[in-house]
Amino acid sequence: MVQFDSQARSPWTPLAGVERLRLTPSQKRINATLEVPGSKSATNRALLLAAVASGTSTLRNALKSDDTYWCIEALKKTGVEIAVDGSNVTVYGRGGVFHSGSLYIGSAGTAGRFLPGMLAAATGNWHVEASHSMNKRPIAPLVKTLQALGAGIQYGDRRGHYPLSISGEGLNGGKVNMSGQLSSQFISGCLLAAPLAKEPVSITVKGGIVQQAYVRITIDLMAAFGVEVKAAPDWSLLEVNPSPYVANDIAIEADASTACYFLALAAITAGKIRIRHFSTKTSQPDILFVSILKRMGCNFEIGPSFVEVEGPLV
């Protein structure tokens, strides 16, 4: 078994190696046009979809973060070739064929919830370890659902938590029930693996879905890679037919959470900040922050691919 450092941090960790950072208040009105990194939620979903697709995918404006670093490293250990050039990532998909081995996902929550199903749908054996903090986070609802679909997944040191041993023999498909009140990532993890099953997958969701917007992000990205999800109007039923993922060239939308900091900066300094490659039509829930700034008296200009905020003069 490969030994991993449970406290390991990626070289992409923000401010890695910086001992001191000094900030001083601006003495003038801030006016700027800028771009923010891509969404973490979209980046890790797209990485996994591109890896399991057939063909070469290019992800533009991908986020470089601790989570995406460990997701990429784990995929590389399965034999997926990935090239990172600044914010552009090229993924040479293997069509769902992965090398067996030991993997480490750090504290990447999205990889931790999305990777097991895709491995279980393939053929091979994997031991997946995570960081100390990730080991504390529950995984049982997802594992239980994947097992009902035919996945060979066993717990390691502690039932319901990482590490996991996965014996990939394919997913059978079928009908399953999931609670929507725990984490939308469990539902997304099942959805991402569903088209790789031998038979259609039908997911009945009980109690509504918390953070429904993130399931929408999952469905939209699955569509971008060639797979349709049929969703009931109230999200109580999700259906997916067996279908291969197809490589694509996509732009990862700007991260709404990151954008909010700069929009807030314009608001509190009576400045004007325009964020390019950003749209209020995004499914990311943090875009609702825009409506809060409007109520605070900020002025907005919204274009097809930008959002501009001007703070109120005081």
Image (spheres, helix red, strand yellow):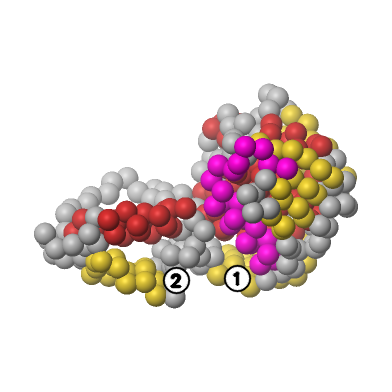
Front-lying residue, 42 or 304: 304
Classify 160 as above or below 249: above
Q: Please identify the quadrant where the C terminus is shown.
A: bottom left
Front-lying residue, 251 or 90: 251
* Residue 112 - label: none
Q: Give the residue at x 44% y 74%.
A: 305
Give the mark nearest the N terminus, 1 or 2.
1
Element marked by disc 2: loop
Q: Is residue 100 visible?
A: no
Q: Give the residue at x 32% y 72%.
A: 301
Front-lying residue, 79 or 311: 311
Labels 1 & 2 near each other (Cβ < 8 A): no
Q: Give the residue at x 72% y 58%.
A: 229
Residue 263 placement (x, y as % from top left):
31, 60
Please identify the residue farthest to the top as the structure is shown. Answer: 158
Badge 2, how many Cα within 10 Å: few under 14, some, many 20+?
many
Q: Does the magenta portion include 105? A: no
Q: Please identify the quadrant where the N terminus is shown.
A: top right
Residue 105 placement (x, y as % from top left):
62, 43
In the figure, is residue 295 to the left or right of 213?
left
Q: Does the magenta portion include 213? A: yes
Residue underneath mark 1: 250
Question: What's drawn in magenta, residue-wise?
Answer: 204-225
Residue underneath mark 2: 277
Q: Amino acid at mark 2?
A: His
CA distance separating discs 1 and 2: 13 Å
Q: Amino acid at mark 1?
A: Ile
